[in-house]
């Protein structure tokens, strides 16, 4: 009943038979350095196994075989955060108070520039709208993707913002922006333009029929039958190729026409924004910054006051000049009278 006693390396050990060391193992504990080396080896092997698994999953994902999350699925850029909505400040660039522009370095004189509230990173209002229409992906990187410019300033009805610029454009801006350019992502403009081309074609159809009939019955055309007759009886693949070339030509011409019309409408939209967006800040060198009445099209009524004050100042200067000249004239006249009286007294003497 008593546990058996074993002598292992001259050490008496009272142990259960199930706990007896087997296979040549000993009861000697490993040194701290050996334990550290063993842990380091196991860590390296685990790291290598994870690297092999990562490389294998990336290689399979590049071939369209997904076996789990990849590096792109679990990676996040350091310090990245979603852009925030922001209010805007609009100012007028003048020769006396020029404004910089993120898009063209210097804004044109007497044009409106806009920037996020609390910053001086201005951009021309027309340049911002053109960039929004041509390449929207480059708008927010102008401010290092800190502000949600497209959502805040140009939000649609379903995603409107309290800082939207489109609330100032009126019915003309609504017709141009929401109907012609944004409805159906430009599909409405294409359909309207195609309908216009169809109406124009139907209008000139009688003239086209007359000209076509005259060409079909003219003798020079049939004298060249041996030249173009082969295309009439050509094989079907050649006819399909000719039809494809004709369709590409028509589609390309329609695309150029659409681009021309769209550019014109975008310029019209820029002009509407330029006229209707109010000015919220005035020049930095003015003492009454932000004061004064501002109408719906951004015209400051203080300009009339400054002009009237300037005219009054000029009138006061002219009155002072006239008073001084009249006084000088009276003094010179008095001196001449004294000289004349003295000359008369000398003659009497």
Image (tube, rainbow, N blue to C red):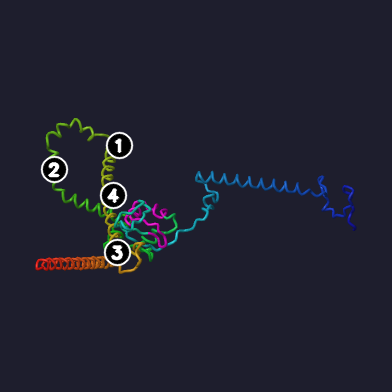
Q: Position of residue 38 (x, y in %)?
A: 72, 47
Q: Position of residue 56 (x, y in %)?
A: 57, 44
Q: Secondary structure at mark 1?
A: helix
The N terminus lies in quadrant: bottom right
Q: Secondary structure at mark 4?
A: helix
Q: Secondary structure at mark 2?
A: helix
Q: CA distance from mark 3 to mark 1?
A: 63 Å
Residue 183 can be seen in this image: no
Which residue position holds label 1? 237
The disc label shown at residue 298, or none: 3
Which residue position holds label 4? 259
Q: CA distance from mark 2 to mark 3?
A: 55 Å
Instruction: Read off the magenta span.
Output: 115-142
Q: Position of residue 28 (x, y in %)?
A: 82, 49
The disc label shown at residue 221, or none: none
Assess whether residue 136 is covered by the magenta stretch: yes
């Amino acid at each position: 009943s008593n546990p058996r006693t074993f002598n292992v390396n001259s050490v008496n050990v009272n142990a259960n038979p199930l706990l007896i060391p087997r296979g040549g193992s000993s009861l000697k504990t490993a040194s701290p350095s050996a334990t550290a080396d063993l842990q380091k080896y196991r860590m390296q092997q685990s790291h290598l196994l994870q690297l092999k698994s990562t490389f294998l999953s990336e290689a399979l994902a590049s071939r369209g075989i997904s076996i789990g999350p990849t590096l792109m699925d679990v990676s996040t850029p350091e310090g990245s955060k979603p852009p925030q909505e922001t209010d805007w400040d609009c100012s007028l660039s003048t020769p006396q108070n020029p404004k910089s522009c993120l898009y063209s370095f210097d804004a044109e004189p007497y044009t409106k520039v806009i920037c996020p509230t609390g910053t001086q990173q201005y951009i021309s209002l027309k340049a911002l709208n053109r960039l929004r229409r041509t390449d929207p992906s480059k708008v927010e990187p102008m401010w290092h993707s800190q502000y949600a410019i497209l959502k805040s300033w140009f939000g649609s009805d379903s995603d409107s913002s309290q800082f939207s610029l489109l609330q100032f454009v009126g019915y003309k801006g609504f017709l141009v922006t929401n109907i012609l350019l944004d409805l159906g992502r430009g599909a409405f403009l294409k359909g309207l333009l195609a309908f216009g081309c169809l109406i124009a074609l139907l209008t000139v159809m009688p003239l086209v029929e007359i000209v076509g009939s005259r060409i079909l019955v003219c003798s020079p055309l049939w004298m060249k039958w041996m030249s173009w007759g082969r295309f009439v009886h050509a094989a079907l693949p050649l006819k399909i190729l000719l039809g494809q070339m004709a369709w590409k030509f028509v589609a390309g011409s329609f695309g150029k026409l659409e681009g021309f019309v769209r550019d014109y409408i975008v310029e019209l939209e820029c002009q509407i924004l330029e006229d209707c967006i109010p000015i919220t800040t005035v020049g930095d060198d003015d003492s009454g910054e932000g004061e004064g009445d501002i109408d719906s099209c951004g015209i400051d009524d203080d300009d009339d006051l400054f002009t009237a004050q300037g005219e009054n100042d000029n009138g006061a200067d002219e009155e002072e000049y006239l008073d001084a000249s009249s006084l000088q004239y009276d003094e010179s006249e008095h001196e001449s009278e004294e000289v004349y009286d003295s000359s008369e007294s000398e003659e009497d003497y």
